[in-house]
Image (cartoon, rainbow, N blue to C red):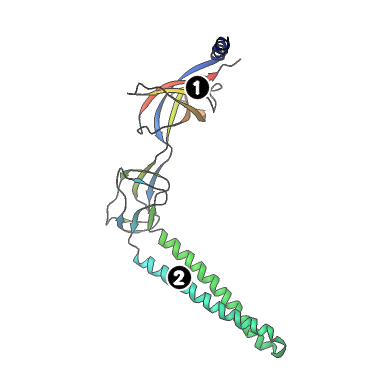
Amino acid sequence: MKKLFFGLLLFFVQLDAQEIYANFFVRAHQDATLAFHAGGIIKTLHADVAQSVKKGSLVAELANEEQKALLNVAKADVENAKVALKYAQRDYERGQKVKHLLDEARFDVYELAYERAKTALSLALANLSYKEALYNKTLLQAPFDGTIYEKNAEVGDVVTEMSPKSVFKILSKKRKLVLEFDQKYWKSVKVGQVFKYKVDGDTKEYQGVITKVYPHADAKSRKMSAEVEAGDFAIGLFGDGTIVAETTK
């Protein structure tokens, strides 16, 4: 009896749902073009086509010996400023303890030296941040975990800040299906609905959940689009399936 009850329940649930046809292409969840934000000569390429890279990993580098030297000088300036502040603070604190024995002008000398030392350290730190930013512009890093699928530069190529040159193109490892369905179902298709599908050349049926419905229809094709998270399919594959949507009452 229980099996019969649940079978009937499932039957009536299915009657209250409609299946909407949709085709799709497999796309990368993220796709980016990597280029330098500084001018110079490409010194090293640390990645190649079909190579997997981690977020933050170095994929290319400009000749940056000058920037590196300036960065080291800025780091040394910070250390010198810290030492100067240390002794200026010591003199100031000593002066405070015997302030009643000193004339006001003498104590002002200690106070002025202490304030100047604090300002000098702030300036040194700001300069260090600036030099780090300039140095980091010579390093090209992966913005996310992914795979390099195109290389457009070689060691020795000149790049300019005014006209950035694409060095690599990268795809994320995460995949998504971009669905297309008839615009007449614009009220029926919603986030959270199940999408049953097959990929061209694969007899297995897969299932996913709609994560995004695009808020516009294409005027030429009269189609709307939606997205479904997918497994590790090859980019560009085609397929079709049905969206299981509740019927409009």
Residue 202 in the image: x percent, y percent?
A: 34, 23
Quadrant the C terminus occupies: top right
- Given the image, on which type of amino acid does mark 2 rest? Lys
Q: Which type of secondary structure does the marked residue at label 1 adopt?
A: helix
Residue 238 in the image: x percent, y percent?
A: 36, 26
Q: Quick one: label 2 or label 1, which is nearer the N terminus?
A: 2
- Given the image, on which type of amino acid does mark 1 rest? Gln
Q: Could you tell me which residue is drawn at 40 percent across and 69 percent down?
A: 70
Q: Could you tell me which residue is drawn at 44 percent across and 65 percent down?
A: 131
Mark 1 neighbour density, 10 Å: few (under 14) some (14–19) many (20 or more): some
Quadrant the N terminus occupies: top right
Q: Residue furthest right?
A: 100
In the picture, the disc for residue 75 is 2
Tell me if residue 99 comes above or below residue 186 in the rendering.
below
Task: Judge left or right: residue 71 versus residue 103.
Answer: left
Q: Quadrant of residue 66?
A: bottom left
Residue 41 in the image: x percent, y percent?
A: 31, 59
Q: Quadrant of residue 92?
A: bottom right
Q: Could you tell me which residue is drawn at 37 percent across and 22 percent down?
A: 204
Q: Could you tell me which residue is drawn at 70 percent across and 86 percent down?
A: 99
Residue 138 in the image: x percent, y percent?
A: 38, 59
Q: Which type of secondary structure does the marked residue at label 2 adopt?
A: helix
In front: mark 2 or mark 1? 2
Q: CA distance from mark 2 to mark 1?
A: 61 Å
> Does residue 222 appear in the picture of this structure?
no
In the picture, the disc for residue 77 is none
Q: Which residue is mark 1?
A: 183
Front position in the image: 152 or 241 = 241
Tell me if residue 20 comes above or below residue 54 in the rendering.
above
Task: Judge left or right: residue 149 versus residue 192.
Answer: left
